[in-house]
Each structure stands twice: as structure tokens, then as C-alpha cells.
Image (cartoon, rainbow, N blue to C red):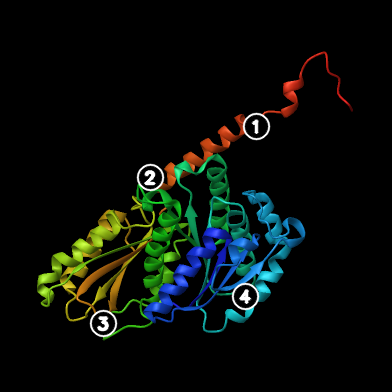
Amino acid sequence: MKAVLLGVGQAGGKLTTALAEFDADAGYGAVLDALAVNTASADLDPLPLETVLVGQSRVNGHGVGGDNELGAEVMDEDAVEVLDALAPKITAEAEAVFVVAGLGGGTGSGGAPILVRELNRVYDVPVYAIGILPGRDEGTMYQVNAGRSLKTLVREADATILLDNDAWRSSGESVEGGYAAINASMAKRIGLLLAAGEAVEGVGESVVDTSEVINTLRAGGMAAVGFASAPAAEDPEENVTTVMSAVRSAVMTGLSLPSATDADAALIAVAGNPDRISRKGSEKARKWLQDETGSMQVRGGDFPLDSDRIAALVLLGGVERSQRVEAFLERARQAVRDEKEETPDPAAAFDNDELDDLL
């Protein structure tokens, strides 16, 4: 899938950079171009991408301070500037646009839905979102922002692939190191998804192509992507269990949104040396995934690579019924309730008869 990436906000810019670099290092050529947009100049300066600073008349390059309503307003006012910068990148070769954003902050969570809406209005190619959910410990404001942003993104985007920070941050890691590791993991998953069928080595029996990715995401709503790999024997007959194990691990422990296994559609790409990939293993894996997701739309194919390992890339579309999503949404709803309770009137401290109002 030939794609153009648009990173919005700090987290979106960093993950977009990781995706573009993964694709370039692997030589797949699936990422045609990338752009980063933000309201904070300090977040754009380190990025090795073309950038657009928005909201200068409102926040003067200092960001929106986590206010996603202001982030949405600023992006709405400056959307034309972003689209103008993006227009030369979305050529006839582009098959999709991915808008990448953290959903807990201000610029990403507020601005991403605006840009998805505008892109869908202008272009005929699918416009997908990649949304990063905040961890439980990131505060009430971030949960509220993410809940509101996700609700809007799901309505505006052709599909929204979710990454759950809580599931991917290892204990004991520094914050910066943790996010770098998360970005690398997600870049591999999305990068391989885009590359499937683009730059293959060898001839697969049934190669995954762009239409199968699009059809899997056509379920709309929310999506998740998983990955796992294992050493492969030279004889494909010995790799039946290897293929099955890789697919199970990709779903059970390697999903970007863990436990989101109730899905409307699914896609398996088995990557590796075509001479080592077991057809029997691939068919058994598809049947297992069909039972696990409850979906009759399970597509599958090969991703030929010159490797002594077998890897499984799994895409699940329409996962909004899953327990993980419902748990996050309940957290966001509770955060809204808590936020209302925590916003007292500052004038209440002066409620006494000895002080009069000025006005």
C-alpha cells in the first residue's frame, strides 16, 4: 500500500518519523512521503520531516497546553495551510493517507479529527487514523481528551488503528525510552502492513495486496495490528506449528490493542522464505483466527522475505466490541465525571457576608 503519512502533535510527529524511517531502512518504498504538523515549534524542530507550524496567531508557537478544544479550533482555522503543504505529496500513486496522533494531548487529539474530515472531503483515497491511547497514569484530562477525540475520529476516518500505551510500556523504563520502544514496535507493525505486497523477495503462493488491507479495514470503526515471529525450519512440513504459534502470539500477546479479539474482519500475512512457509499451517491459522474473532471475513496470504524466520502480521478490523475498548471508554467516561467534580468555582472561597462583589 503506497501511503502518505501526516503526524499531528508531539506523539504523532514522533511515530510518523519512526514509520518513515522503518520503511526507508527496510527499502520497502511503501511510504511515499510524510509531513508533521504541530502548534508547538519546539516539538517540530527535532523532526527530520517537512513540518507545518499552525496556530501562530493564537498560541505563538507555544502549543495549546493540552486543550484539545483549542487544538481543534486552531486546526480548523489553519487546515488550508496544512492541506496545501500535503497536496504535492498525495500524488496519483498514493493509495491511502494515514493521520497519526496521540489522543490524550491537545494538538493531536483536537487537530487529527479536523484534518481527517478535511482530507476525506478533498481526496478519494481512504483516510485512516492511527491513534495512541494514553495510559491510566497520564491524568484525567488526557483520558477525557482521548475519549472525545476517539469518538470523533471513528466517525470521520475510514478506520482508526489503535495503540494502547499501557500495554506497551515496560515497567522500569524511562518515559522517553518507553515511548521510543513503543514507536519502534508500532512502526514495525504498520510498516510491514503497508509493505505487504509492495516490495517482496521471491514469489509467494498467494501474496497479500493493498485491496485486502483496504477490505479488512472497510469494517470501519476501530482496528488493531499484531506481530510475532519465530525461527523456521528449512522443511515447510516442520513449520506447521511455527506458523500457528506465530499467528497465535501476534493475536494473544502482540496486538497494538491487547485483548481486542472480537472483530468484524481479519487479515493474516505470513512472512518468510516462500519455500519454508507451510500451507497447512497457514490454513489452520486462518481457521483458528476465524474462531477466535467470530468473523467469517478472514483473509490471508504470504509476504515473501529472505529470512530464516517466519513472522505473522495480523490486522483486525471492527474491534470496537472488545473488552479492551469498553474498558478504555468507561475510563474516559469516569474521567469526565471526575473532571466535573474537580472544577469548583474559585469565587466560592469568598462566600461570606463580609466581602462584597466588585460588580
Secondary structure beneath dot 3 equals loop
Residue topped by disc 1: 343
**Distance from Cα at disc 4 to Cα at disc 2:** 37 Å
Q: Which residue occupies the foreground of this view, 252 or 104?
A: 104
The residue identified by callout 3 is 204
Up-down relation of residue 34 to residue 223 (above or below): below
- Residue 158, percent across and down? 52, 64
Front label number (1 vs 2):
1
The Cα–Cα distance between marks 1 and 2, rounded to whole angstroms, is 30 Å
Of badges 3 and 4, nearer the viewer stands: 4
Q: What's under tag 3, amino acid-wise?
A: Gly
Q: How crowded is mark 2: few (under 14 residues within 10 Å), some or many (20 or more)?
A: some
Can residue 58 be seen by looking at this rendering?
yes
Q: Select label 4 or label 2 by which is in front.
A: 4
How many numbered discs?
A: 4
Name which of mark 4 and mark 1 comes first in the sequence.
4
Q: Mark 4 or mark 3, which is nearer the start of the sequence?
A: 4
CA gap between label 3 and label 1 equals 60 Å
Residue for badge 2: 323
Which circle, 3 or 1, is nearer the viewer?
Answer: 1
Whether the residues at callouts 4 and 2 have beta carbons within 8 Å, the answer is no
Give amino acid for label 2: Gln
Q: Vertically, is 23 above or below 162? A: below
The percent coordinates of residue 94 (x first, y second) are 52, 80
In the image as oriented, which residue stretches furthest toward the bottom? 202
325 shown above or below 177:
above
Residue in the foreground of this view, choosing between 81 and 95: 81
Q: Residues within 10 Å of mark 1 (few under 14, many from 20)?
A: few
Residue annotated with mark 4: 86
Q: Which of marks 3 and 1 is nearer the N terminus?
A: 3
| Distance (Cα) linking label 3 and label 4 | 35 Å
The span from disc 4 to disc 1 (Cα, nearest Å) is 40 Å
